[in-house]
Amino acid sequence: MAIFSVYLVNKAGGLIYQYDNYVPRAEAEKTFSYPLDLVLKIHDEKVIVSFGQRDGIRVGHAVLSINGVDVMGKNTADGKDVIEYLKDSSNYPVSIRFGRARLSSNEKLMLASMFHSCELFDQNLKIALEVAEKAGSFGPGS
């Protein structure tokens, strides 16, 4: 069994430490001609595929690079807007690399707080079961 991430959360629910052993699994690069046959949209400050799976490109994959230039959020490293760049027919043919995007810092904090909430629920459930066991049965004939 592999460990992909480690999260250390304090009792108050704050994220103390987080480590990602990030190995991008499914990355697909393909050259497209105009018009682009995938539907892209901006979601959580990332450009993702919202419709049109093909050749290893799946719905939910993010645009990682265009013509070898990395994409950060919704802009390329050159500062060009990805959606506007792909609407312009003079930029084609274009090579686009797709894959799973890394979690943002905010998404990591939300994930850690979810772990904390699950742990609190588990602790409360254990206490409730112990109280029920001590109290005995409550059915007819008690």
Image: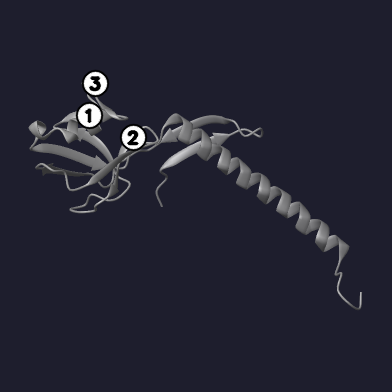
- How far apart marks 1 and 2 lie (CA) works out to 12 Å
- For image coordinates 81% across by 63% down, the residue present is 133
Q: Looking at the picture, which amino acid does disc 3 mark? A: Gly
In-front residue for pair 37/110: 37
Residue 96 x/y as whole percent? 17, 38
Q: Is residue 131 left or right of residue 89?
A: right
- For image coordinates 70% across by 48% down, the residue present is 123
Q: Is residue 104 left or right of residue 25?
A: right
For marks 3 and 2, the one nearer the N-term is 2
Which residue lies most toward the top here? 79
Location of mark 3 (residue)? 79
- How far apart marks 1 and 3 lie (CA) works out to 10 Å
Q: Disc 1 vs disc 3: which is toward the camera? A: 3
For marks 1 and 2, the one nearer the N-term is 2
In-front residue for pair 136/109: 109
For marks 1 and 3, the one nearer the N-term is 1
Location of mark 2 (residue)? 46
- For image coordinates 55% across by 31% down, the residue present is 15
Location of mark 1 (residue)? 70
Residue 114 x/y as whole percent? 56, 42
